[in-house]
Image (cartoon, rainbow, N blue to C red):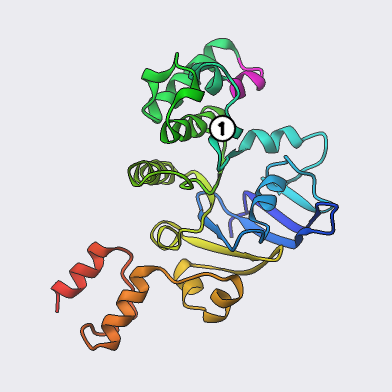
Amino acid sequence: MEEPILKIRDLYYDYGNGTTALNGVSVDIYEGEKIAVIGSNGAGKSTFFLTTNGVLKPDQGEISYRGTIINKKNLKELRKNIGIVFQEADNQIIASTVMAEVGFGPMNLKLPKKEVLKRVEEALTYMNILDYKDRPPHYLSGGEKKRVSIADIIAMKSEIIIFDEPTAGLDPLNAQMLEEVLDKLGSEGKTMLISTHDVDFVYRWAERAIVFWQGKIIADGTPLEIFQNKEVLKQANLKRPTIIEVYDLLVEKHLLEDTKAYPISIQALREMLGNM
């Protein structure tokens, strides 16, 4: 059995005002996984992300990256290899031009200037924003800022990329752009963790879903397993994806034979109906 790229054991984190954000979280993350982290607001998802990449120090617990336990001395290694794309791009963007912004991380890695420029150009090309390189990022649209914040992480060559509510505030066109980028990163074998309230996206995109509730993981499985577990959905205050609801309704009305092969998209459902 392959070793997890990231091993998290018994993480506890308290914000000091009596709020326990993480309450004994343990999970293994494997290379190349596409994971959705779901649960209602305040369930502990963002705190989990911030402790996972070393921004917050857990009160208790252990994080191992590629078999090495993380401590004060090697914390930099964790931050270098686990990049976070925050929900609000403005909270991430600090430089006066797009080029300086995307180059900030690689510069901090003390890389040669030539390597930094190469990485910046590659990341901007990847996100289709090379034309914006001399523009001030704060004057860009929401979707363009999101592209810049993802380019930041791509330039770092992070092995694991965390997206905290990536589609929040994006219009449908930019949300689709983001999904295309995620598919592209997935096809290249990147390990990704995404928190989102969009259950339709979770069902369509993720291979694995981890459900948080009151600082704990209460379920971990395929999206289909999670969305068929009524107790988990009720406890975590989650709804089922539309396509699952539609499938069950068609079966109930005897318009479709129940093969238990749930369609993952409208196109797949259309083909099912077309084959009848």
Which quarter of the figure is the C terminus placed in? Answer: bottom left
Q: Visible in this render: residue 189?
A: yes
**Residue at image x 72%, y 47%?**
51
Q: Main secondary structure of the magenta part?
A: helix
Q: Does the magenta stretch include residue 108?
A: yes
User: Residue 270 placed where, x, y %?
Assistant: 19, 68
Q: In this view, does 271 lie above or below 90?
A: below
Q: Is residue 255 above or below residue 195?
A: below
* Mark 1 Cα-neighbour bin, 10 Å: few <14, some 14–19, many ≥20: some
Q: Visible in this render: residue 67?
A: no
Q: Give the range drawn in magenta.
A: 104-111
Q: In this view, does 237 lie above or below 172?
A: below
Locate residue 170: give its quadrant. Answer: top left
Viewed as shown, does residue 38 lie left or right of 254?
right
User: Residue 122 placed where, x, y %?
Assistant: 43, 23
Viewed as shown, does residue 261 lie left or right of 102?
left
**Residue at image x 56%, y 71%?**
237
User: Residue 148 placed where, x, y %?
Assistant: 48, 29
Q: Does the magenta stretch include residue 82?
A: no
Locate residue 263: give its quadrant. Answer: bottom left
Give the residue at mark 1. 90
Secondary structure, mark 1, is helix
**Residue at image x 21%, y 73%?**
272
Q: Residue furthest top?
A: 113
Locate residue 1: give its quadrant. Answer: bottom right
Viewed as shown, does residue 50 lie left or right of 118?
right
User: Residue 134 placed where, x, y %?
Assistant: 45, 13
Which amino acid type corresponds to the residue marked 1 in the rendered image? Asp
Q: Nearer the viewer, residue 175 or 268?
A: 175
Viewed as shown, does residue 192 lie left or right of 14?
left
